[in-house]
Image (tube, rainbow, N blue to C red):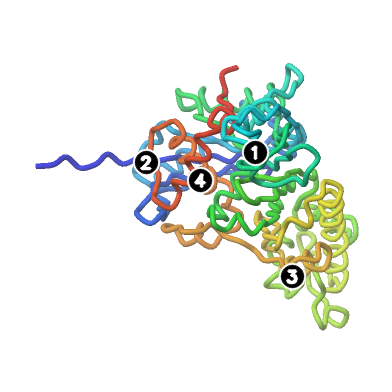
Amino acid sequence: MPRKPKRRIITGIEIGTSTIKVVMGEFLPDDVLAIVGAGQAPSLQVQKGDILDVEVVLNQLARAVTAAENASGLTIRDPIFVAVTGAHIRPVVAVGRTMIQGPGHTVTEEDVVTAVQGARSYGLPPDQKSLHTWERSFQVDDGARVPNAIGRVGDWLSSEVLLIVGQHGPLETTCTMINDLMGFRARDVAFSGVADCFAAFSAEDAQEGHVLIDIGAGVTEFVVFRGNGCYNAGQVTIGCDHIANDLAIGLRLPQPRCKALLRDLTELGCTAVGSPDGHERSIDIRSGPGKDRRVPCASIETILRLRLSELFEVIREHLERHEALDRISDVCLCGGGAMIPGIADLAYSVLDRPAKVVRPRLLSGQQEILNAPNYMTPVGLIRWGRLMLEIDGEAEAPTLRRQFLAEARRFAGMVRESFKF
């Protein structure tokens, strides 16, 4: 009797400012990701993605891991992939240059590899590590920048790549914490925004060019995903906690009450772009034991619009400065902030691109995850993790992904920076 194939469960862990999420998944035919278990716990002593107290965070992570294992009936084992964010993460654009060695000065694959390796050798400070490396464009002599230079004729080839780098200390703190809890290290670490993109887009989707904006509690990450991968990335240390603080100041309410208010906006009928009757309607809000206040709906909406408009303006200015805005066809929103009513319309008005809230693609399992834009990161980690395993030869790629995987394998040393500190 043939033996039953061993299940390959991949786990994604996100340690966010407000919540720690642990998601376990396995892949079914046709690239469907089945969620077999998920758990979460309040994230304490994490500020804007930075871990302030390792012991406290470790205890909360243990709670989330236990919840996921109980939901699945399975013990979490290797491989685990973990997301990181915070002010220490930054994008760097590096350029490599080489003489074209191909016959007749025609650019070959070897020329491309040499140019990309030259860009990747960009000298980082000793306290920083590269998380991701993505090709952006190529240029032959003084010609136009193109996504693929193979077959072009010239004397010099330059390669422009995007590095996403982080500081050694916070990265190693996260890896060590996982090892202390699980007894083994995470296989790899990804920038949260990159993980989001793997949850949202297929290789075919990426050809159109999107900017994905993840609005979390303390940090908002954004990534321009186009062509072979990440073209531009950044983050703003503004999130839902800042919106709640604005509401607390503007409405003279306790901040915990304003955090709850953000979760109840749909029920209250308030939107980020303003409701038709917002100026005529007031909302009863309990501000303390036995204390109720009537707050104009328009006041809440004005605060939402001002803070979120500022956030999108900062992102737009960044994209324009880095010549990335013209490379996107639409805006995709995820994270807890994506559940604010009217946020897609507000993003469209500021960024001048069609905007929508996205959820994990090709997913099966728990309904609360299927429709949750705030689960994009741990779900994306599982998809990104599978790619890392494929690059390492530990998993077989589905047919539709083989071309993309072949491209990734060609630059395996540049796509994956293993964490051997």
The residue nearer to you, when weighing 142 against 79, is 142
**Whole-Å distance between the Cαs marked 4 and 3?**
36 Å
Rendered position, 211 above or below 179: below
What amino acid is labelled 4 in the image?
Phe
Q: Could you say where residue 80 lies in the image, as x and y percent from the top left?
A: 48, 34
Q: Which residue is mark 4?
A: 404
The residue nearer to you, when weighing 194 against 21, is 194
In the image, which is nearer the foreground, mark 2 or mark 4? 4
Q: Which residue is mark 1?
A: 134
Where disc 3 sits, the SS reads loop
Q: Which residue is mark 2?
A: 396
Left or right relative to 367: residue 133: right
Who's the residue at 44% across and 33% down the image? Answer: 79
Callout 2–callout 3 Cβ contact below 8 Å = no
Mark earlier in primary sequence (1, 3): 1
Residue 8 visible here: yes
Left or right relative to 400: residue 217: right
Q: Could you say where residue 91 lies in the image, as x and y percent from the top left?
A: 75, 36
Residue 42 visible here: no
Mark earlier in primary sequence (4, 1): 1
Q: Could you say where residue 92 lies in the image, as x and y percent from the top left?
A: 76, 34
